[in-house]
Image (cartoon, grey):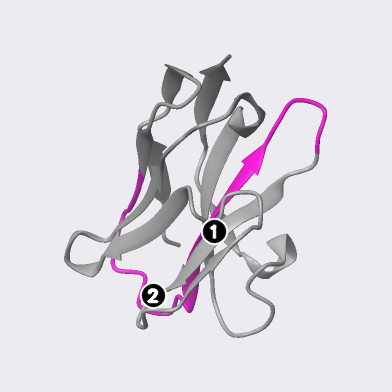
Amino acid sequence: QVQLRESGGGLVQAGDSLRLSCVASERPSKTYAMGWFRQAPGKEREFVAAIRWTATSTYYAESVKGRFTISRDNAKNTLYLQMNNLRPEDTAAYYCAGKIGGGNIYLITQYGYWGQGTQVTVSS
């Protein structure tokens, strides 16, 4: 099974930017889409953004539209999340995940493999 490893998290101030990366151990040839999710302390894991692996379609949660950009580099088997104008409410552990097959791209249950996460903390 494909292994995912996130990196790029850290402690920043409100208004700053970060770029998260997620490297896959091998080419995710059967993957329909890749996504980013986040989980804040005491809250459920939530959808942030997703991208089709072989198409250009992107999907975002309303809370991050206009601030976050998801992208991928197929040659490097890498998924990115560019996060601009960060807010304290963006503080969470961020996870990348892979989705095999169609279905609702926003649903966490549609994703079959996950990374270990990277922490993003935004101070006010």
Mark 2 lies on residue: 53
Marks 1 and 2, how far apart at CA: 13 Å
Q: On the rendered structure, is 99 left or right of 72?
A: right
Q: Secondary structure at mark 2?
A: loop
Query: In the figure, residue 99 lies in which quadrant?
Result: bottom right
Q: Residue at x 50, y 32 (%)?
A: 86
Asked if residue 42 lies in the magenta stretch, the reply is yes
Q: Position of residue 124 (x, y in %)?
A: 58, 14
Of the residues shown, which amino acid type is indicated by label 1? Ala
Q: Residue at x 38, y 32 (%)?
A: 17
Q: Residue at x 42, y 21 (%)?
A: 10
In the image, 90 versus 47, the foreground residue is 90
In the image, 45 versus 82, the foreground residue is 82
31 w.r.t. 10: above or below: below
Mark 1 lies on residue: 49
Q: Residues within 10 Å of mark 2 (few under 14, many from 20)?
A: many
Range of magenta residues: 21-43
Q: Position of residue 40 (x, y in %)?
A: 70, 31
Query: In the figure, residue 101 lies in which quadrant?
Result: bottom right
Q: On the rendered structure, is 119 left or right of 69?
A: right
55 w.r.t. 82: above or below: below
Q: Position of residue 31 (x, y in %)?
A: 45, 75
Of the residues shown, which amino acid type is indicated by label 2? Trp
Q: Residue at x 67, y 67 (%)?
A: 106
Q: Position of residue 91 (x, y in %)?
A: 61, 27
Q: On the rendered structure, is 51 left or right of 101?
A: left
Q: Residues within 10 Å of mark 1 (few under 14, many from 20)?
A: many
